Image (cartoon, rainbow, N blue to C red):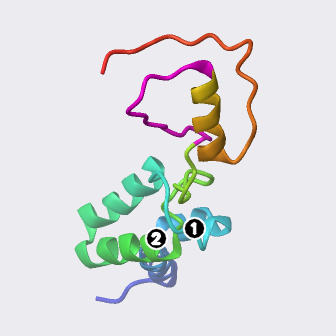
Amino acid sequence: MRLSRPIKAVAGILLMSHLAACGTILYPERKGQIDGRIDPSVAVLDGLGLLFYLIPGVIAFAVDFNNGTIYLPDTANVEGDDDGVRVVKSDEPLSMDNLAEKVEQATGEKVDLSKAQVSRTAK
């Protein structure tokens, strides 16, 4: 059975797209990301590759994870990115002066707590 040229071309394009991975084709600007939230659209497209063709689907996931194109942009967890929140523990009762001193020790910044509203929480 001989296949016509257009059918061969379409089959070749489909195979190449599955081997190259969906995220790499759709979002080449995402290459090089290391971590982040997974883009559901890319994951679903790679999953369809698994559903129809096992080996190309696995390759699509591997390529997208390796290139970082499966991750949404600007969602990577950066080491030390804690939004400036720090927990300061103290065994002694805290006064405003003592609290200001503890915050200064933890952050290296002088703070003015004269207008601060402080409430106690349960241990």
Other-residue count near label 2 (Cα within 10 Å), few / some / many at <14 / 14–19 / ≥20:
many
Q: Magenta stretch?
A: 83-96
Quadrant, the C terminus: top left
30 or 17: nearer the viewer: 30
Q: What secondary structure is found at the residue carrying circle 1?
A: loop
Quadrant, the N terminus: bottom left
95 or 118: nearer the viewer: 95
Label the magenta part by its dominant secondary structure.
loop
Other-residue count near label 1 (Cα within 10 Å), few / some / many at <14 / 14–19 / ≥20:
some
Residue wearing tag 2: 64
Q: Where is residue 18 in the image (x, y as percent from the top left)?
A: 42, 73
1 or 120: nearer the viewer: 120
Look at the picture and state if 41 lies above or below 70.
Answer: above
Residue wearing tag 1: 33
Q: Which mark lies nearer to you, 1 or 2?
A: 1
Residue 29 appears left or right of 99: right
Amino acid, disc 1:
Gln
Which disc, if any, is residue 80?
A: none
